[in-house]
Amino acid sequence: MTDMTTRSQLEGALVAAASNYSWTWDRHTQSLFSQLPSGTGFLHPLQRIRALTDANYDRFLSDRDFIEAAMAAALRVRQPERDPNAEIAYFSPEFGVSETLPQYSGGLGVLAGDHLKAASDLGLPLVAVGLFYRDGFFHQAIAHEAQREMYERSDPRSLGLEQMPVMVDITMDDRIVKARVWRADVGRTRLYLLDTDVELNDERGRKVSDRLYSGDREHRIRQELLMGVGGVRALRQLGYTPSTFHLNEGHAGFLALELIGEEVDKGLNLSEALDAVRDKIVFTTHTPVPAGIDRFPHDLMERYLGVWSDRYGVSISELLSLAHMPGEPETFNMAAFCLRVASRSNGVSKLHGAVSREMFSKVPGGPEISSVTNGVHAKTWVSNDLQEVFESAMGTNWVSTSSESWKPVETIDSSVLRRVRRKDRQYLIDLVAERIGPRVELDPDILTIGFARRFATYKRADLLLNDLDRLEQLLTDSDHPVQFIFAGKSHPADDSGKEIVHRVASFAASEAARGRFVFVPDYQMAVARRMTAGCDVWLNNPVRPHEASGTSGEKAALNGCLNVSILDGWWDECFDGRNGWKIETSDAADRMERDADEAASLYSILIDEVAPLFYQDGSPMSDAWIEMMRHNWKTLGPFVTASRMVSDYDRFVYRPDLRL
Ligand SMILES: *Cc1c(COP(=O)(O)O)cnc(C)c1O
């Protein structure tokens, strides 16, 4: 049959395989796509397929293995028909499914992407809703050591999105804004994205879904109405009747307006309607920092709530009171609103759950806040070479939550682990070279320490620069050579975050860096993947307890990269004394003093413990180091995955009636 394969059959198979984002975790499909000419940047495979020439096809059509791999990849994505009765609707302002679909800014989005992938793996009946931002989130360039922001328009059709035959109307400030709906397939999970960039809208209406996290308060209100209200209407038009609506952070909270409206239309009054919808809404809070919550001034909200007070037959002030946070006059507090309309709520680690209970204790009538600790989608984040090793040791079901199943890591040969880790370090170094050119030459045989995440100030990306003498001691130690790789974007409106980018990039460009400290621009998922797989140590030094969970350290742990972290978020509950290191938290009240204390703890861990252990046998990756990696896998592997997280949501949040 392969002898007869025509060009259009082959093209059809490649397009089918590229049209489902399952390629982001199917390493066989990835290996197929790696044979396509790569083009520049991080192109979606569909764009690479569309760029194939006659000569490319002639070559592929004479390559039996390639044809068979393409046909097999297409078969793997053949979908069962969509389930219009998906029981859980998952709403999020951002989705990090792939670096080729730039609809995320950081951890919240990547978590959402991983949630959909794990739901697909588990066969959970979940459908997802968000916005399609035409210009996505910004790309970061570094010019004169400062962050520059660039936006790139994307074309949904070249990203594997399919337009749905529906159009949604939302009233905003007395005008109707229309949105079309795109669908992205993420394995068996459907992701619907609303997009107002349609000709039927005026200029202002078209811009509602222009960019992620940009613009003023009013722009935010409009985006959130689009997502919440428009999202529910889109689901209805598509035939969905979910029994649970999950708010991944409060930005989609306005979905309650529409759900309440549906009940009011059936004849209930506001309070009865609230009771009726509450049971369906669950709210996950992600920030322990009050400044991280959406708050809208009352005068603005009044303009947007007019249609709702008319529909419900209540006063605007009654609606405003639903979002009142005691002690905060004249603001519509989105977290307070979500807590009042939800029957279940959770934080994203045990510690964060406790902090959130305290933080929201003032909101009367809210549900008790529990916690589900974040996890990461193993097959997306573990390097392909390491996955092969895991598969041969533990079988294809190595992504398992049973501790038993991780035991066989003991039997993997140390030399195999050293070889895979070196290869992944080399891949990372290749990526750094592609991105910053030949300025710095990194070494694939030395201890490599990574730090990458959004440069929000509480994450303290510059803590390592706190005492430059001690840092120099690390960078010049010829017995225990160490290199550092840093990356991260700051929100464009966050001047202190940008100042930290500037500090770190300036240090990397200085003589003091000794060629052993680099800053990689434009942090995104592909960079995160190579870094968490290619580093030996993952640094995390937020101001405790401001890191709600953190997930990059979980990606690192699955790759055998050991964590050196403040006891915050997920690490606070997972550190066991031997699966990584804890940076001591200082109780100094003064912030400078606290930074200095915690930096001192960090230096002494790196200088006195990490580096000597890594080189204990006189060469990289001592036996004791490998033992620690194995212990890291055995203790963390069963816990840090998104399958564990999503099954926890299923058992304890989506279907609490199953609670033991
Ligand atoms: C995993 C990931 C994050 C989250 O990192 P944290 O450690 O949770 O701050 C942010 N951005 C990208 C691109 C990621 O892949």
Image (cartoon, grey):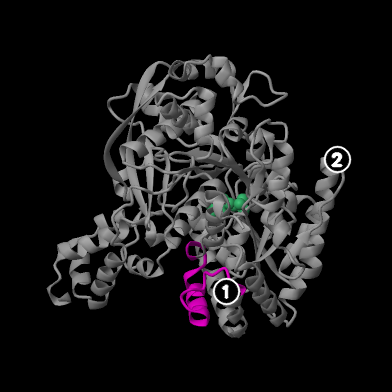
Residue occupying the point 31% across, 41% down = 239
Q: Could you tell me residue 503's position as x and y percent? A: 68, 45
**Residue 348's spot in the image, x, y percent?**
63, 49
Q: Which disc is residue 421 wearing?
A: 1
Separation of marks 1 and 2 at Cα, in angstroms: 41 Å
**Neighbourhood count class around disc 2 (C-alpha, 10 Å): few under 14, some 14–19, many 20 upward:** few
State the residue in front, 597 or 382. Answer: 382
Q: Which residue is mark 2?
A: 590
Residue 216 in sight in this render: no
Question: Which image quarter is the C terminus in?
Answer: bottom right
- Give the label on residue 573, or none: none
Type of amino acid under label 2 = Asp
**Residue 321 at x, y percent in the picture:** 61, 21
| SS state under label 1 | helix
* Residue extent of the magenta highlight: 379-403
| Residue 244 placement (x, y as % from top left) | 48, 44
Residue at 51%, 60% in the rendered image: 377
Which secondary structure lies at badge 2? Answer: loop
In the picture, measured across the screen, residue 218 lies left or right of residue 443, that is: left
Tally the numbered discs: 2
Q: Amino acid at mark 1?
A: Arg
Q: Nearer the viewer, residue 639 or 497?
A: 639
Q: Quadrant of residue 444?
A: bottom right
Q: Is residue 615 visible?
A: yes
Magenta: predominant secondary structure element?
Answer: helix
Relative to 11, residue 595 above or below: above
Q: Is residue 381 magenta?
A: yes
Residue 557's quadrant in the figure? bottom right
